[in-house]
Amino acid sequence: MVFLQFKLFYKTQRELALSLNGIVDAYWNNELNEDTLFRSVNEVYINNPNKILKDGAFTTVLKQQCGKRRLEVIERIINSNTGMSS
């Protein structure tokens, strides 16, 4: 299993999007298990909520950089832990 290293705090939305892409892609490539995927996305979200969501929706930069399929996965993870539904 490959160890994926990521930061908890990001300077820009673009850096954050690249990191989230790496996390989801690693899961899709069977390099991360589900627990690690959930924990990683949640840690990034908890420390950077304003760079991920604006007015309850993903920021434009994240939409452009991550794409629909990755954001669907990220949204489900975020919603599963916050009790929100889409």
Image: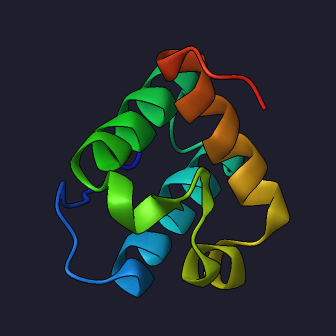
Q: Nearer the viewer, residue 64 or 5?
A: 64
> Where does the image place residue 77, in percent across and percent down from the top left?
59, 31
Residue plotted at (82% across, 64% down): 68
> Where does the image place residue 16, in percent across and percent down from the top left?
38, 71
> Where does the image place residue 41, in percent across and percent down from the top left?
44, 42
- The quarter in which the N terminus is drawn is top left
Q: Is residue 60 above or below residue 31?
A: below
Residue plotted at (49% across, 20% down): 82
Q: Residue furthest front?
A: 55
Residue plotted at (32% across, 49% down): 44
- The quarter in which the C terminus is drawn is top right
> Where does the image place residue 48, in percent across and percent down from the top left?
28, 56
* Colour setup of the view: rainbow
Q: Quadrant of residue 58?
A: bottom right
Please give left or right for residue 20 compared with residue 86 in the image.
Answer: left
Please give left or right for residue 75 compared with residue 44 in the image.
Answer: right
Q: Quadrant of residue 12?
A: bottom left
Residue plotted at (59% across, 50% down): 56
Q: Is residue 77 above or below residue 61?
A: above
Q: How many marks?
A: 0
